[in-house]
Image: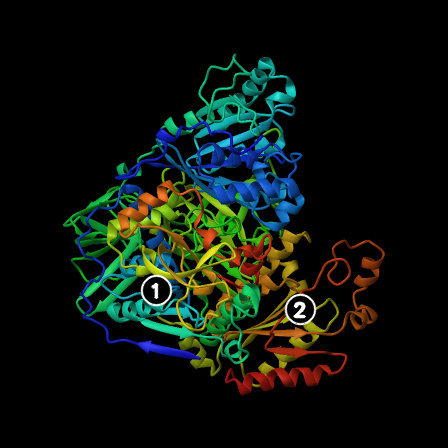
Amino acid sequence: MSYHEAPTIAASDAPRLDRDDRPTLRFVTCGSVDDGKSTLVGRLLYDSKTLLDDQLDALASESKIAGTTGGDLDFALLVDGLQAEREQGITIDVAYRFFATRLRRFIVADTPGHAQYTRNMATGASNAELAVVLVDARKGVITQTRRHSHILSLLGIRHVVLAVNKMDLIGFDGDRFAAITAEYLTMAGQLGISQVQCIPVVAPDGDNIVAPSVRMPWYTGPTVTAYLESVDVSGDVSQRPFRLPVQWVTRPNAEFRGFCGRIASGTIATGETIAVQPSGRQTRVARILSPDGERDHAAAGESVTLTLTDEIDVSRGDVLTAGAAPQVSDQLAAHLVWFDDEAMVAGRRYMLKCGTASTGAVITTLKHRIAIDTMAQESAATLDANQIGYAHLSLDRALVFEAYRDSRDMGSFILIDPISHRTAAAGMIDVSLRRATNIHWQRLAVDKSVRARLKQQRPCVLWFTGLSGAGKSTIADLVDRRLAELGRHAALLDGDNLRHGISRDLGFSNADRAENVRRAAEIAALFVDAGMIALVALISPYRNEREQARQRVETGEFIEIHVATPLAECERRDPKGLYRKARAGELPAFTGIDDPYERPQAPEITIDTSELSTDAACERIIGYLRDNHYL
Amino acid sequence: MTGQIVMEAPPAHDAPDEAPAHRSATSHLRRLEAESIHILRETAAEFRKPVMLYSIGKDSSVLLHLAMKAFHPGKPPFPLLHVDTTWKFREMIAFRDRRAHELGLDLIVHTNDDGLRQGIDPFTHGSARYTDVMKTQALRQALDLHGFDAAIGGARRDEEKSRAKERVFSHRSAAHRWDPKNQRPELWSLYNTMLAPGESMRVFPLSNWTELDIWDYILAENIPIVPLYLAAKRPVVERDGALIMVDDERMPLRPEEEPHLRSVRFRTLGCYPLTGATTSNAATLPEIVREMMASRTSERQGRMIDRDSPASMERKKAEGYF
C-alpha cells in the first residue's frame, strides 16, 4: 500500500481555521502484546491526516528497514519512539500522540502490553476519559485483557471501546466476534464499566477505523473514529462541593497574600464563606485572580489565586473548601496497584502524596489481593509488582481527602519509597476508617526538654545494627552499664528480649521482622520523649527500616552504630549456633547467609570488633556522646 | 562564562503581558493553560532551586508568559537561563535582553568557554559535535555551576517521537542522563519530585500542547515573539536543500553561493547556520496560523540537528540535551 492513497477524511472536512473550540477527548489504548495497539494509533494518525509529508517519507523508509510488515507501512513505528522499542518491535513506555478530526481533538496515550510495564499502562490511563481495549480475535479475552480492564475500572474509567482486531485472520467470523463480545461484557459488568462499545477491526488495513468495513457487512455499529467523535464522557465535577488544594502561597508585598491552586471540584465566588482544612477555620473569599484577569467567580479545572478576608494560617497541603465537609483522617482504606519491583511490606514506612499534601504512611494491613484471572479476592501478606490489592493505611498526620469515586484529584495518591525514591504504588481511596478530627494529642505540660534537663543529658537513640554474632548486645550492654556509672538514665532494648515480650506474637517472616523493628523504633521514640537514652540492639538488616526508625525521632536524636564485624568472624564465633543451623538449611532467610544485610551508608559510628575490644568500643561511643554534648 | 543580568524590576502590581487580547482564548486553550500553570507552581513548591530554560523561541515565549501568570502579582520564583552558543540569530539575542528587561527577571546567560577556546563551530565540526559541546555540555555546566535541581523547558510531546514518550517531570541522574526505559510512573497530576543528592528533574509544562495550540495561544494572548517568525526579505543561501540565512560575516560561503534577498520566515529558531527558513509571505500572526493549517511538513524539518542519525534526539536527550 502506498501512503499517497487518499486518506478517508476529505480535504474539505479538514480542520477549521478561525475560532476553534472543538473539545478534546483524552483516551488510552491498552491490551496485550501484539494485539496491535500501536498499529491502531498509527492508523488513526494516518487517517486523520495528522501525518505530514516529511513524517510519511520517514515512515516509508523506516518501514523498509525496521518494519515488521514486509515493506508496507508499519504504523507502529509512528508511536514506538524509543530505540529499544523499535529494535525489539514492542512498546515499553506510554507515547502521547495528538490528532484531530472535524468534530474533536484527541490526545491518545498508547500504552505497553507487557505485564512488566503495567505501571506505564496505568500512567497512560490515569488521565484518560475513555479506553480502547484491543484484543486479538484469535485469542479473545486473556489475562492481560482482564488485568488492564481491572485497572481501568479502579481508575474510574467508565467508557470502553473493545476493538476486536485481526478479524481478517479469523475469516471475518461474526459468531466469534459475538462470543468475545459476550465474554468481555460479562467481565465489564462485574467491574462496573458501564459503557462498552464493541467494534471488529483490522487495524493495519483500516477496517472500521474511519470507514465502515466492506468486508464485515454484518457489523452495523459505529466505526472507532465515529464513536470517539460522538461519545459523551462528561462527568461534571463543577457540581460537587468546592475544593481547592493549596499549591503555593504568594506574597509579593506586605499587602498581598494569595493562595494558588487548581480547583479540584465545585465553583467559588467572591464573598463566599470557605473553610481551611484540616484546621476547619472559616473565612471569606476576597478576590479571585485567574489567568485572564480578576474575576468574581471560578470553577473546577481552573488554576486561580484567591485572597481571603482574614489573616489566617494557610499553607501548601491545606485545602480550601465550601459546602459539605471533606473527610479528614489519618486512617484510610484504599485500592492499591503495586508498581515497584520491591514487594509491598506491611509495617514499612512510605511517603504518601495526595493532592498537594505529603506525609509518611504505613500500610497496616493488606485486606486482600485480586486474583486477576478469576477476579476473586484472595488473602495475601504482600503485593508484588503489577498486583492489585486493598489495604488499610495509617498516616503520620491527618489528610484532607474524598473517596476516589467522588473526586479523582482529592481521592488519589502515590506511595514513594523513601530510600530508592521510586514510585512504589498508586492508590485510590475508598473510605476513611475513622474520623481523626476527634483525636487530639494531649498537650503535655512537662516535655522532653524539661525531663532531659533534670537528667542532665540530651535524649537520643543509640541504634546498634550488624550481623548476628557481631557483638551488638555485648557492646550495648557495656555502654548501658557505663552510662549508669556516670549517673545517666538509659534503657536497653535487645532484639532477643523484645521477642520474649512485646513481640512474642511475631515470627520470622519478612513482614514480621519489619514489624519487630518498627515496634522497637516506636518504643525507643517513647523513651526519648521521656528524656532517656534508648539503646537498641537489633540486626535490622534493611536500610529503609533503619531510616524509618531515624525518622521517628527528631534530627540529631538518632545515632546509628554499625557493628561491622566481618561475616567470617561472626560465623567463627557463632555464639548461638545459628550460622551452623543456617548453613544446614534449618533457618531460612538468615541474614548474611541467604538474606542480604544492607550496610549503613553513613552511620554516625562504625565499630569492627575484630579490631577493637569491647571496652574500647564502649569508650569510643561514650566519647562520641560527650563530644556531641549528649552527656 | 556566566553573566548574571539583573534588571531593574517594575512595580509589583504592573502586570505585563496582559494587554487586551484581540481574540480570547478558547476553553481548549484555557484547559492547557490551567494545567501548565499547575505544573509550574508544583515545580516552584517542590524544588530547592529551579530554573527556567529560555531558548527565546515561540515555545519559550509561551512558557514565560505562563510563568508570569502563574505567580502574578508576584514574579516567577526562579531565574531564566539561556545557553548561548554565540551562533544564535542576532535578533534573538536582542529580543532576549529586551524581554528580560521589560519583565524585570533574572537572566543567566551561559556559554561553554572550553568550546569557544577550542573554536568549535557548526561549519567545521559538524552539527553533531557542535551541538554536543555548545548546547548539551554547556547546559550541563550551567546546571552544575548553579546547583539547579529542576530545569523547566518548553518541549512538547508532539515535536518528536522520543519526546512523545517523556514524562512531565522527567528524572535525570547525577550525570544528567535520562533513562527512557526506566521512567517513574506518573499518574494523575501527582508528581514524584524526590531526588537523591546530585540528581535533578527536567520539567515540561507544555507537554500536552501542539504546535498549533502554541500559535493559537500566542495569537489569543498577544504574546511577543521574535520577528524572525514573520516573513520578511532576508539574505539567504541554499545549502544542502535548506535555506540558510546569512546572519553575520562568520558564515563561510561556498564558491557557488551568493546570498539573495528572499521573503522567508522560520518555524523554529536555533543557531542560524543550522536553522532552515521556509519561503513565505505570512507577515502577521493570523497569516502564520493559516499557513500552518495548510502545511504538509513538520516544524522539525527545518532543524538540521535532528537528522544527524536515526534516533538522534533520544540519544542527545539521554546525554543531557534538552
| In the rendered image, the vertical position of residue A149 relative to residue A140, given as above or below | below
Q: Nearer the viewer, residue A87 or A303?
A: A87
Give the residue at x 66% y 59%: A500
As drawn, the label of residue A443 is 1
- Which residue is label 2 attached to? A599
As drawn, the label of residue A101 is none
Instruction: From the top left corner, tell me how far across and down residue B21 is, in percent.
Output: 20, 51
Chain letter belonging to callout 1: A
Chain letter belonging to callout 2: A
Visual colour scheme: rainbow
| In the rendered image, the vertical position of residue B56 relative to residue A51, given as above or below | below
Q: Nearer the viewer, residue A620 or A34?
A: A34
Q: Amino acid at mark 2?
A: Arg
Q: How many marks?
A: 2
Give the residue at x 47% y 14%: A220
Q: Nearer the viewer, residue A422 or A418?
A: A422
Q: Which quadrant: the N terminus of chain A?
A: top right
Instruction: From the top left corner, tell me how far across and down residue A129 is, in percent.
Output: 41, 36
Q: Quadrant of residue A380?
A: top right
- The reply to whether residue A79 is in sight is no
Report the side of B145 relative to B214 (left or right): right
Instruction: From the top left corner, tell me how far across and down residue A49 is, in percent.
Output: 44, 35
Q: Nearer the viewer, residue A573 or B301?
A: B301
Q: Residues within 10 Å of mark 1 (few under 14, many from 20)?
A: few
- Mark 1 or 2, nearer chain start: 1
- Callout 2: helix, strand or loop? loop
